[in-house]
Every structure is written in structure tokens, then in C-alpha cells.
Amino acid sequence: MISVILLGTGNVANHLIDAFLQTNTVNLVQVYGRNAAALKKIEKKVDTTSNLAQLKEAGIYIIAISDDAIAELSEQLLIKDKLVVHTSGSVSIDALKAPNRGVFYPLQTFTQDKPIDFATIPICIETKQKEDFNQLQQLASLLSNNVYTIDSKQRKYIHLAAVFTNNFVNYMYKIGNDICDDNTIPFEILHPLILETATKIKNYKPVSIQTGPAVRNDKKTISNHLKLLKDDEKEIYKLLTQSIQNTYGKKL
């Protein structure tokens, strides 16, 4: 059984807590956090502490906090000969100060109180020392069926790609939702279109299934759309339309 201490109480940390507690092969020894209210919510499930000096011993220490705070917390940990990893997609493995260090990056968007099946989540792992790799790979495999060996350089590009395919796409949903709300249209009317678009990329490269007025060079429709949009939305529409046209060799 692998023993783990989790440092953090945010979205990623809470989903990891639930995942670890659901398996009989991981011993979640303790959770550290500075948010007293967050710790109180989980104190009946697992031992908690807000004092780094009171950390217990475990085989792996997982730092699941905001990117900007990882290096600072790592410097405060007085842990020797144990594996210390973080869960960030954009922070280098070398942000950790422990000699035995690594990365345990679950590639997914996490929402508070929304259950998620970790078995389907890709987990990207990396270690500095070869002897730590098998241990981290074993831990990842206990949670997920999709474990990838990814170094820090690759992970930065994965995180960048994820921003485009998740964060930016979700913001497009927000704009579409606003347009519907402003015109008394139920946003649910777009759900089948959204789901079909997402489903198609499992079998086709995105570049081969682009549709819409930009790729068709439908200038009249583009002009009509721009007249309906607010200033910020108009600039986004122009930028995306121009980028699509550049990709497919069209001209506005």
C-alpha cells in the first residue's frame, strides 16, 4: 500500500482526497491546509493539520495548491529521502526543492462538488530520480487507466493546449450563453451542437471538420454577425474569423 500526504484543500486536492479514500490500495495519511473551514469539512474523513511541523511520515507528499505558491511551500518542507510532487500543468519539476521530486498532473478540469471518475483522467508523471519513477507510476495507475510519462517541457505545451481546448472554449460557451439570454433563447438549444462538435474530434482531426461562415468565406453572414455583436465580442469574432481564414487560405 502506498502512503500519501496531501498538501492543499482546493478543487484538485479535494478530488484527489475523494479518489484516494475510494481505493483500498492508497493510505491517505494526512491532509495539510491553511484554510480552517476547508479542513473542517474533511476532518471526519482523514487526519488534518494546518501546521507543517506536525506533518506525519508518508511515502509520497503531493502539493496540490496554486501554481505561484508551490515553490514557497516546497522550501518550507523539511522532508528528506521521500518523494515530493506537485500537481501543476505549467510549473517545472525544478520548482520543488526536495532532492526526490516529481510531478503528478491530472489532466482535467475540476469543479467543486462535481464528482469525477479518476479512472478516465490522463495523469502525466515525471520524476527527477529514476528510482522514484516506479513508485509514482504505481500511484497514478491505482487511480487512472491512462498514465503518461511527460517531461516538464512537454507538460507546458499540454497545459497551453488545454487552455485553448478547455478554458477558451468554455469562454466561447459563455458568450454564446449571453447572446441567448439577451434574446430570450434557451441555451439548451445549442447543447446538441456542442456535444456533436466535441464527439467528432474523437474520430477526426479538428482541421478537417471546420465549418461556418469563416471557412466558407461567407462575407455577407460575417458582416451581419458583426452588426449584432457588442464591442468585445466583435473583436473576438473578427480575430477568430481572420485566423480561420488565414488557416484555410481565405480572404475577408
Image (spheres, grey):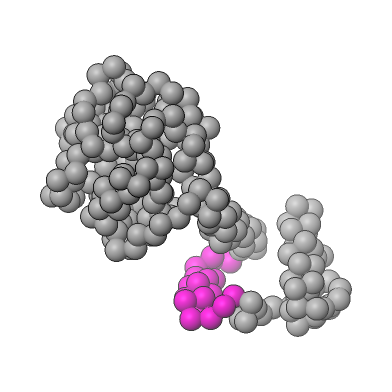
Circle count: 0
Horizontal placement of 206 versus 114: left or right?
Answer: right
Horizontal placement of 40 versus 87: left or right?
Answer: left
Is residue 172 visible in the rendered image? The answer is yes
* Residue displayed at 41% across by 49% down: 126
Q: Residue furthest front?
A: 130
- Which is more toward the observer, 57 or 237? 57
Whether residue 129 is situated above or below residue 109 in the rendered picture: above
Q: Main secondary structure of the magenta part?
A: helix
Horizontal placement of 230 versus 83: left or right?
Answer: right
Horizontal placement of 196 versus 232: left or right?
Answer: left
Whether residue 30 is situated above or below residue 2 in the rendered picture: above
Question: Where on the picture, by quarter, is residue 54?
Answer: top left
Residue 68 spot, x, y in % from top left? 53, 32
Q: Which residues are magenta?
A: 185-206
* Residue displayed at 66% across by 80% down: 211
